[in-house]
Image (spheres, rainbow, N blue to C red):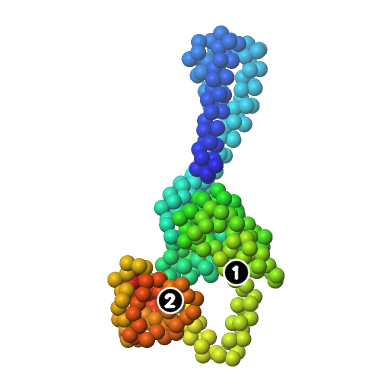
Amino acid sequence: MNHLAEVRDRLFGVVGMLLACLVSGTLGYHFIEGWPLFDALYMTVITLATVGYGETHPLSPAGRVFTVLLIMGGIGLATYGFSTLTSVLIDGELTDAFRRRRMDKDIAKLSGHFVICGAGHTGAVICAELRKTGREFVVVDRDAEALSQLEERLGFDLLRIVGDGSDDSVLLRAGVKNAAGVFAVLSTDQDNAFVVLSAKGLNPRAKVLACQKSLGVREKLLRSGADGVVDPEFIGGLRLASEMIRPVTVGFLDSMLRAKDAHFRFDEISVPSNSPMIGKPFGEIKGGEGGAPLVVAVVAAGSEAYELNPPVARPVRAGDRLVILGETEALGGLRKRIA
């Protein structure tokens, strides 16, 4: 059940109990004292409201006992009702419920986006990179506080869902059936394996990447359906070695990733079969002057071999995958020209 439905049911429950108390009091005075229904209702209201007005009619001993019970029950009910209304209105539960409902609608409109299962440090890095490169994404984590801290750390609003990323219903809410890819970056390999299995079962076309947390599980994650497995410890070791033996190269990559005034990235573009660039020489798109993106390498259709620095006369072919380097806005422009 969604949060808005829970808030609605709580409010309806309070209203229902108040009505039940009014009806019980009215019928009680009517049958015990023989009063008209309106007089009985009036007595019930002033009794529950504890306004201190006098009795509508003199009460019998049985009526006084009933009044005591009505006051005790009414005060408890009123206290519960006011605390519920305070929680819903003043503490922001209703606002939060509408925000979540609006967020669910925004997520339902997404297509070709990414689902990030895990709001830890790795998930934060992925969020920041996807944001810089103009990709849409949804973050899923079972810890609501972790999601709030992630949003505060990144400094922008997230499309986020509180829930277990290995749960099919949660992934469906995150739009996994229309997603381009899923990141499984939870705290344990077991959780990541379950995310991979669920995501692949719901959308076999989505690319699913898993984060490896311990040695010896890479093959297991791949067998569970992951399209790729990344070992942060291995990457970190290579990064440390590179910092030591090739500092200038590493410095260039760091400046490219960390620059605040411009976002330079390596990216890739696949040439579709209807691209207007098919048959034209690479010299028309290769770059090398001004702010034009650079075509660093090409992987031909049906091949996994990299053709570094392709000749300017080589024609562009359908299915070519281009490895390009440039500023994110210029990369977007090139992507539109090729597509």
**Residue 45 location in percent, x, y?**
52, 23
User: Disc 2 or disc 1, which is closer to the eye?
Assistant: 2
Does residue 16 appear in this view?
Answer: yes
The quadrant in which residue 13 appears is top right
SS type, badge 1: strand
Of residues 221 and 288, which is closer to you in this image? Answer: 221
The quadrant in which residue 322 appears is bottom left
**Residue 27 location in percent, x, y?**
56, 15
* Quarter the C terminus occupies: bottom left
The reply to whether discs 2 and 1 touch (Cβ–Cβ < 8 Å) is no
Residue, disc 2: 300
Of residues 104 and 115, which is closer to you in this image? Answer: 115
Identified at 57% across, 24% down, the residue is 21
Question: Closer to the N terminus: mark 2 or mark 1?
Answer: 1
| Vertical side of 241 occupied by 185: above or below | above
Identified at 53% across, 61% down, the residue is 182
Of residues 243 and 87, which is closer to you in this image? Answer: 243
SS type, badge 2: loop
Identified at 58% across, 87% down, the residue is 243
Residue, disc 1: 229
| Vertical side of 24 occupied by 201: above or below | below
